[in-house]
């Protein structure tokens, strides 16, 4: 999965869940998630894996 595919999946999930909840469950800082969502940054590999795992398995 690419960063862009994960970003789109994340945006879709935000229609159902709050970003602060995803942040607390994954342990990823909400500011990092905001910048990722807006396309300003790509996630580090270990953060990518955490978010991908959450989005695919929950």
Image (tube, grey):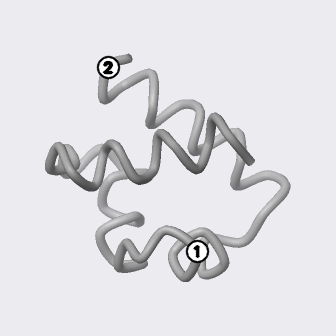
Q: Is residue 34 above or below residue 24?
A: above
Q: Is residue 13 above or below residue 30?
A: above
Image quadrant for the N terminus? top left
Q: Is residue 36 above or below residue 39?
A: below
Measured in 3D between alpha carbons, the distance from the residue under mark 2 to the one under mark 1, in whole angstroms, is: 22 Å
Q: In the rendering, which numbered label is found on residue 25?
A: 1
Secondary element at image label 2: loop
Q: In the rendering, which numbered label is found on residue 37?
A: none
Residue count near mark 2 (Cα–Cα under 10 Å), binned few <14, some 14–19, many ≥20 = few
Residue at 70% across, 39% down:
12
Q: Determine which residue is flagged by label 2.
A: 2
Q: Are marks 2 and 1 in contact (CB under 8 Å)?
A: no
Question: Image quadrant of residue 21?
Answer: bottom right
Residue at 40% across, 53% down:
50
Give the percent coordinates (x, y) of residue 57.
68, 40
Q: Nearer the viewer, residue 14 or 21?
A: 21
């Amino acid at each position: 999965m690419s960063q862009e595919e994960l970003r789109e999946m994340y945006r879709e999930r935000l229609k159902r869940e709050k970003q602060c909840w995803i942040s607390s469950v994954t342990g990823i800082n909400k500011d990092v998630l905001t910048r990722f969502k807006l396309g300003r940054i790509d996630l580090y590999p270990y953060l990518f894996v955490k978010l991908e795992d959450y989005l695919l398995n929950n």
